Image (tube, helix red, strand yellow):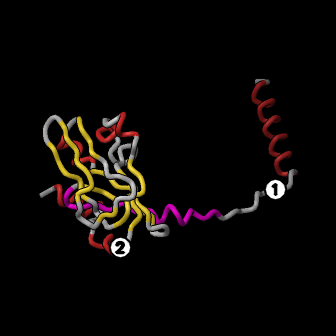
Amino acid sequence: MIAAPLRTACFSSLRAAVRATPARVAPIRSFQTSSVSAAIKTLYTAEHEWIRFDDETNKGVLGITDHAQNSLGDVVYLELPAPGLEVSKGDQIGSIESVKAASDIYSPVSGIISEANEKLNDEMTLVNKSPMEEGWLAKIELTQPGELEELLSEEAYKATLDH
């Protein structure tokens, strides 16, 4: 019987203390999301290449899709484009071989290759493990950004896989 009155007394004291304390509300701060992240988009080709590009810098990263690496199987050989190589949309920029097949890699846009993913020379399995992140193939500076409009959105690319 004693516990109940003590509990009530404790909560009563707490309530009184809370009421007596002036409310301090932190000012509301407005945070803006980065416009850079909004400017980065990923588009696809019907031949299973992708490009993640930044509208503001006209630079992109390209590689093969998860569907492509899945179809190929374990990668055993990879030829990457050389930095400085100037390419047109649709040009062959490399090749990839697996235990199942070999395939050419084509540039989804025109531009100048600024970097090849040198990590793949030692770890080709990154193309299989993480084709859209660590397994990227090259970086490119776009010379014809309007060509991006001819590529597929993720939804349109997935629709091509269903046929």
Residue at coordinates 24% horizontally, 38% vertically from top-left? 77
Residue 80 located left or right of residue 140: left
On screen, residue 153 versus residue 47, left or right, reads: right
Q: Is residue 90 magenta?
A: no
Query: Of 125 and 82, which appears nearest the observer?
Result: 82
Horizontal placement of 106 versus 54: left or right?
A: left
> Is 38 placed above or below 135 here?
below
Front residue of 52/93: it is: 93
Which amino acid type is shown beneath numbered disc 2? Gln
The magenta segment: 31-47
Amino acid beneath label 1: Ala
Q: Is residue 52 visible?
A: no
Alpha carbon distance from label 1 to label 2? 58 Å
Which residue appears at 75% of the width and 61% of the height? 27
Front residue (pair 34, 12): 34
Which label belongs to residue 47? none
Residue drawn at (27%, 47%), measured in percent from left and top? 66
Q: Is residue 32 magenta?
A: yes
Q: Residue at x 31, y 72 (%)?
A: 147
| Disc ID at residue 144 | 2
Q: Tag 2: Cα neighbours inside 10 Å, few (<14), some, or many (≥20)?
A: few
Residue 28 figure quarter: bottom right
Q: Secondary structure at mark 1?
A: loop
Q: Position of residue 63 (x, y in %)?
A: 31, 52
* Residue bearing mark 1: 23
